Amino acid sequence: MNTKSLTATQIDTLAQRLSETQVVASTSAKKAGDHLARLLAEQIGNDRGALAFTSIMTAATAEQAEARLTLVLDYGNTEPANEAAPEANEPKAANAPVIC
């Protein structure tokens, strides 16, 4: 897979979804990434924020990064290629009785 780094503008656009105030344009992708990482940690916690940041920043395209951020915000999923995380209170399937 050919991965292209996200630009500062693309990262700032993602960060704006997490911020209540206007995000100031970053001068570098590094600064924009640091800001996005801080916002993720504030919103979903340090551990999950770090996982989400890695997933978002390793996306192949800006559209994929946006989709991954949506998964994190809407479903709490920090995994890059999976469906939404299952609910913690879902009952597990019981084994069906075998009738011979």
Image: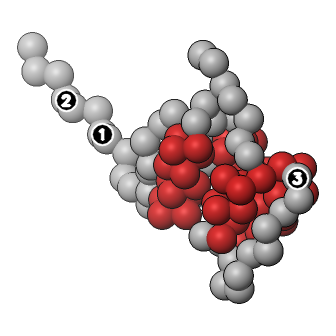
Asked whether the viewer can see residue 88, the reply is no
Q: Earlier in the sequence, mark 3 or mark 1?
A: 3
Q: Earlier in the sequence, mark 2 or mark 3?
A: 3
Asked whether the viewer can see residue 60, the reply is yes
Q: Position of residue 50 (x, y in %)?
A: 79, 51
Q: What secondary structure is marked by label 2?
A: loop
Question: What is the C-alpha distance between the residues marked 3 and 1?
Answer: 53 Å
- The residue wearing badge 3 is 28
Which residue shows up at 55% across the image and 51% down it?
66
The relative height of residue 54 versus residue 21 in the rendered view (above or below) is above
The quadrant holding residue 95 is top left
Question: What is the C-alpha distance between the residues marked 2 and 3?
Answer: 61 Å
Which label is found at residue 69?
A: none
The relative height of residue 8 versus residue 44 in the rendered view (above or below) is above
- The residue wearing badge 1 is 94
Q: Position of residue 62 (x, y in %)?
A: 58, 44
Which label is found at residue 97?
A: 2
Instruction: Please state which amino acid type lies under the numbered disc 1.
Output: Ala
Q: Nearer the viewer, residue 1 or 81?
A: 1
Q: Nearer the viewer, residue 10 or 95?
A: 10
The relative height of residue 68 versus residue 12 in the rendered view (above or below) is above
Look at the numbered discs 2 and 3 and tell me whether their residues touch, using CB distance below 8 Å: no
Circle 3 Cα neighbour tier, 10 Å, few/some/many (<14 / 14–19 / ≥20)? few
Look at the numbered discs 3 and 1 and tell me whether their residues touch, using CB distance below 8 Å: no
Instruction: Please state which amino acid type lies under the numbered disc 3.
Output: Ser
Left or right: 30 as drawn, with respect to 71: right
Instruction: Please state which amino acid type lies under the numbered disc 2.
Output: Pro
Question: What is the C-alpha distance between the residues marked 2 and 1?
Answer: 9 Å
Q: Nearer the viewer, residue 45 or 88?
A: 45
Q: Which scheme is used to colour this image of the protein?
A: secondary structure
Which residue shows up at 30% across the image and 40% down it?
94
